[in-house]
Amino acid sequence: MDKPQNKFLSVVYQLYSVAENGEKHLEEQTGDDRPFEFITGFGISLDRFEQEVSGLEKGSHFDFILQPGEAFGDYVPEGKHKVSRDVFTINGHFDHENIFEGATITLMDNEDHQFMAKVVKIEEDGVTVDTNHPLAGKLLNFTGRVIENREATEEEIQHLIKHLTGGCGHHCGGCDHEGCGHDHENCDHHHDHEGGCGCGHCH
């Protein structure tokens, strides 16, 4: 299916992960006060997500399932790495305020590529981080409503292009773990604590 280009969409949604027994867990949601707004064709949202919502009219409701391969990929055990505590040390002190078990942080490899990671375990000999996307390997269910669906204006498109190429450091650039075979032994802690990988904004 061809992906529509340059359509401005505003949607509110609930994102659930679905367990093998069918039980759902709410992972993220947006509201009318903070809808998810994006322009299609720029890789801001998941391809399947764009395909599902871009053909819907204003006011339409949606409810669809994404397999891991259509969302954030399978969980890769090799995505777990132990890195030196020195990476998280500032002026001789370990960064306890931001580095704690369960925290989502931004790391940078020796080629200045940023990627998100979750702190799994903190030990004396190092910090174990997981570079898999938090929703990797999970069956996902999106439900929601289309608030707006129209052609994007040239001004909106140019603004987005400037936003994407200006190094603004918004979440989505750090959520793509494709090729996360970074040399994690040489990664740096980039102190950009966005508080997590806002999954809705990384579709």
Image: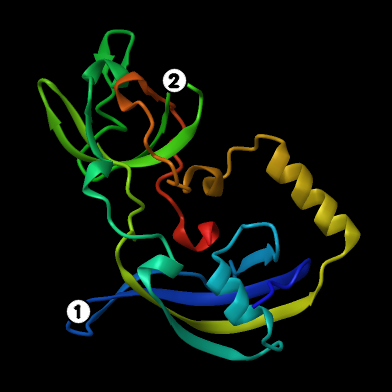
Residue 18 position (above or below residue 111):
below
Q: Secondary structure at mark 2?
A: loop
Name the image quarter holding residue 108: top left
Of 191 and 7, which appears nearest the observer?
Answer: 7
From mark 1 to mark 2, how far is it between C-alphas? 39 Å
Residue at image x 31%, y 19%?
A: 87
Residue at image x 76%, y 71%?
A: 7
58 left or right of 118 in image: right
How many numbered badges does the structure rendering display? 2
Q: What is the three-letter code of the residue carrying label 1?
A: Glu
Residue 32 in view of the camera: no
Q: Earlier in the sequence, mark 1 or mark 2?
A: 1
Q: Name, please, the residue furthest toward the front.
A: 1
- According to the image, label 2 marks what residue? 110
Q: What is the three-letter code of the residue carrying label 2?
A: Asn
Q: Name, please, the residue furthest toward the top.
A: 92
Residue 10 in view of the camera: yes
Residue at image x 69%, y 57%?
A: 42
Residue at image x 50%, y 30%?
A: 113
- According to the image, label 1 marks what residue? 20
159 left or right of 144 in image: right
Disc 2 crowd, CA 10 A, few/some/many (<14, 14-19, 20+): few
Q: Which mark is residue 125?
A: none
187 left or right of 82 in image: right
Q: Secondary structure at mark 1?
A: loop
Disc 1 crowd, CA 10 A, few/some/many (<14, 14-19, 20+): few
| Image spot of residue 115 (x, y percent) | 44, 38
Q: Name, please, the residue furthest toward the left.
A: 124
| Image spot of residue 25 (x, y percent) | 28, 74
Q: Quadrant of the N terminus?
A: bottom right
